[in-house]
Image (spheres, helix red, strand yellow):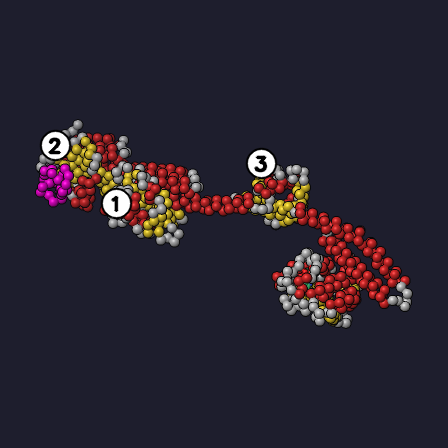
């Protein structure tokens, strides 16, 4: 070990070289900033002598980042306050400013040496001091100061020795500082990465918030953490989650934007560390008052999602006593992660809600619904479907929809291509239920996308009842056809024979009785034929046998049939059929019955003295024919509906209230006219009569059929 008496003329150069070698050797292996600083001071104290040494490490901007004081062989831990003072007002500050070494043989005689008002140093007596800057390539990385209790102890030689050591040590200090910075960044990154892993693990908002709090507590080592989110509208912040003893009381508290430290951070969009909360003007004591918690120090960072501040994250009272330099960047890092995670969780919640809504609708639907993949394999069924088909969900999920019913590939497309492409189709089929019963169904199929996967939705509507009615109707129709038509034909021909056999000087009474019988029979025959036609046309059969027909013939035949009815009610009939109308392509018998239906209705709703007009005119490629009355009219809302089967307009009780009917006549007219390629409609206003009109295509010349 060297001592001060080594520094003598002659021995100096060798001694200096030895020292330099020794220093570089000592420092070469050290990388840890604290170790480097300790070694530098110890070497200096050993080689230059002195009672006490200190180093303040500065960053690129000249701000202190670390420091150390060594007294004798002991490292003093709490150094910050003292060194901050000397850097602000004392000798270290002078050295930092001037980039120059300083020698003060007697501190009581030099203004550069200032003593703090309190503490150990305040009481100490005058001493001798040397201080030198640590400079690497013009950059100041620190200031080293040695003191000796003996006034006048340090000389110029000591000063140059200290300078030499400083020059030698500066590089090692810089390296160690950079290493410390790198390590610090790495620590921050690791803390954030750890948090990222944890926070990203869930999509449930509550869980995400909880994990953010846990991660912050762990990374910053604090007593309590709270998280507030900006309310829609951006005026307020509401605490959504909090840990710590009083955490529960914090949740739900509302603060204004800009109010308190949290409000300040949310508004400013930047993080903040407040080491002494109670004396900070931004501190908002109301929250502490509300919770009974005592906030000492606060670290607060904004929570950002897509660059927008959506809340703040607040860490309170570090358990280590004070926040360190790493804490704010770590908190800000977690804040950024939190923003994305919260936003994702919120989106996920919305999606879940929508999904639940959909599932409820699905489950509660009164229609049986199956969800299948594009090949028809059943994925999901609702209660109604299980009930209708008779299998339980599990069994159904092993089945294919095609095994349950005969699919109609005409509408679905080959291999269901049409629905796969997005078309919605429907068809009738028979469902093969569990108990071997066959259920008539209407099938509606369309493609849906669930969670990004394309699937098919099959709605199966039980139409057994409708089918039963159809069967009944068909039975009825064939009953009419077989059991009514031929006996009726016999009656008609019987009456014809009778009429022929009637003597010339006939008895008028017999004559009129016969007429009534003949007309009534004709009426029944017409009705039977209309019913039969209706049922055939509904079954998709071709209409009778259309051929070129004179409109006037149709009108006259119809008028003849209804004349007795009109006379009976004293309703006047008028016909306005212009001459030269082209012939229409019609099954005369069917269209005559359309006319008779319309005229009979008109008479039925007319009262004594009213006029019913029958007319025709050309309308492009069609002839339009109409029946107009002056009766009660039909409300707008019913004008479409009356053409449906069994539709009857409800009228308030009145003169027409007692008219009877089944609501079949107009349904027949519509089928017959449309079967001919024409249209039928009504123009009417309540109280002002109705005009029923229909069109039949004109027969093209040379057209026979
Ligand atoms: P029905 O006369 O057997 O009830 P329709 O199919 O012929 O059946 O008529 C359906 C309904 O349309 C009738 O019940 C009636 O309410 C209304 N309707 C038909 N023609 C007229 C008309 N000329 N004036 C007023 N209402 C009519």
Residue 8, numbered circle:
2
Q: Is 205 or 27 nearer to us in this picture?
A: 205
Q: Give the x, y percent position of residue 321.
A: 25, 38
Q: Is 604 or 473 nearer to us in this picture?
A: 604
Q: Are marks 1 and 2 in contact (CB under 8 Å)?
A: no
Q: Is 398 or 192 nearer to us in this picture?
A: 398
Q: Which residue is mark 1?
A: 277
Q: Is residue 108 magenta?
A: yes
Give the distance between the C-alpha atoms of the residues marked 3 and 2, in whole angstroms: 100 Å
The part of the chain drawn in magenta is 103-127
Q: Quadrant of the C terminus?
A: bottom right
Q: Quadrant holding ligand 1?
A: bottom right
Q: Give the x, y percent position of residue 251.
A: 35, 44
Residue 161, numbered circle:
none
Ligand 1 closer than 8 Å to label 3 CB: no
Give the distance between the C-alpha atoms of the residues marked 3 and 1, in whole angstroms: 62 Å
Q: Quadrant of the N terminus?
A: top left
- Mark 2 crowd level (few <14, some 14–19, many ≥20, 10 Å Cα): few
Give the distance between the C-alpha atoms of the residues marked 1 and 2, in whole angstroms: 57 Å
Residue 394, numbered circle:
3
Please indicate, yes or no, whether residue 163 appears anywhere in the rendered image: no
């Amino acid at each position: 070990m060297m001592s001060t008496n080594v520094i003598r003329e002659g021995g100096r150069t060798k001694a200096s070289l030895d020292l330099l070698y020794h220093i570089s050797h000592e420092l070469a292996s050290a990388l840890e900033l604290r170790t480097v600083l300790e070694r530098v001071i110890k070497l200096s104290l050993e080689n230059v002598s002195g009672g006490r040494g200190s180093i303040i490490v500065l960053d690129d901007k000249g701000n202190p980042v670390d420091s150390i004081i060594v007294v004798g062989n002991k490292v003093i831990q709490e150094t910050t306050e003292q060194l901050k003072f000397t850097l602000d007002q004392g000798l270290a500050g002078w050295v930092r400013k001037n980039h120059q070494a300083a020698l003060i043989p007697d501190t009581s005689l030099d203004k550069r040496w200032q003593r703090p008002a309190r503490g150990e140093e305040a009481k100490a007596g005058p001493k001798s001091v040397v201080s030198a800057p640590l400079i690497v390539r013009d950059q100041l990385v620190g200031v080293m100061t040695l003191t000796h209790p003996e006034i006048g102890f340090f000389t110029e030689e000591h000063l140059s020795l200290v300078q030499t050591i400083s020059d030698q040590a500066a590089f090692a200090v810089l390296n160690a500082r950079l290493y410390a910075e790198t390590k610090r960044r790495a620590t921050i990154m690791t803390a954030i990465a750890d948090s990222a892993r944890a926070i990203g693990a869930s999509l449930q908002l509550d869980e995400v918030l909880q994990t953010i709090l846990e991660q912050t507590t762990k990374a910053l080592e604090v007593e309590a953490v709270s998280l507030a989110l900006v309310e829609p509208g951006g005026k307020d912040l509401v605490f959504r989650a909090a840990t710590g003893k009083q955490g529960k009381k914090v949740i739900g508290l509302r603060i204004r934007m800009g109010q308190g430290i949290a409000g300040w951070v949310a508004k400013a969009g930047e993080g903040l560390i407040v080491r002494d909360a109670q004396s900070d003007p931004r501190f908002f004591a109301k929250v502490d008052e509300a919770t009974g918690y005592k906030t000492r120090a606060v670290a607060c960072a904004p929570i950002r999602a897509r660059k927008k501040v959506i809340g703040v994250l607040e860490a309170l009272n570090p358990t280590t006593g004070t926040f360190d330099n790493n804490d704010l960047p770590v908190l800000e890092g977690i804040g950024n992660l939190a923003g994305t995670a919260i936003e994702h969780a919120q989106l996920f919640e919305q999606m879940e809600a929508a999904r639940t809504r959909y599932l409820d609708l699905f489950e509660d639907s009164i229609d049986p619904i199956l969800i299948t993949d594009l090949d028809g394999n059943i994925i999901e069924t609702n209660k109604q479907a299980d009930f209708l088909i008779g299998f339980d969900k599990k069994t159904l999920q092993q089945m294919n929809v095609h095994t349950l019913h005969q699919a109609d590939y005409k509408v679905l497309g080959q291999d269901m291509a049409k629905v796969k492409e997005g078309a919605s189709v429907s068809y009738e089929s028979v469902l093969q239920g569990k108990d071997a019963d066959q259920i008539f169904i209407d099938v509606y199929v369309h493609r849906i996308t669930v969670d990004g996967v394309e699937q098919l939705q099959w709605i199966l509507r039980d139409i057994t009842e409708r089918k039963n009615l159809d069967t009944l109707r068909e039975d009825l129709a064939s009953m009419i056809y077989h059991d009514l038509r031929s006996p009726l034909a016999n009656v008609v021909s019987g009456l014809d024979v009778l009429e022929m056999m009637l003597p010339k000087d006939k008895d008028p009474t017999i004559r009129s009785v016969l007429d009534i019988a003949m007309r009534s029979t004709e009426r029944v025959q017409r009705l039977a034929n209309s019913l039969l036609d209706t049922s055939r046309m509904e079954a998709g059969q071709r209409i009778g046998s259309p051929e070129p027909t004179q409109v006037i013939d149709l009108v006259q035949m119809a008028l003849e049939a209804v004349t007795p009815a009109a006379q009976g009610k004293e309703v006047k009939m008028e016909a306005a059929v212009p001459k030269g109308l082209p012939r229409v392509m019609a099954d005369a018998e069917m269209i005559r019955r359309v006319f008779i239906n319309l005229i009979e209705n008109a008479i039925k709703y007319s009262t004594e003295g009213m006029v019913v007009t029958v007319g025709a005119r050309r309308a492009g490629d069609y002839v339009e024919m109409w029946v107009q009355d002056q009766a009660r009219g039909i409300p707008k809302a019913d004008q479409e509906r009356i053409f449906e089967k069994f539709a009857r307009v409800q009228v308030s009780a009145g003169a027409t209230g007692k008219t009877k009917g089944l609501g079949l006549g107009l349904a027949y007219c519509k089928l017959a006219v449309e079967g001919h390629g024409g249209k039928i409609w009504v123009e009417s206003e309540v109280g002002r009569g109705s005009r029923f009109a229909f069109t039949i295509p004109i027969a093209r010349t040379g057209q026979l059929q």
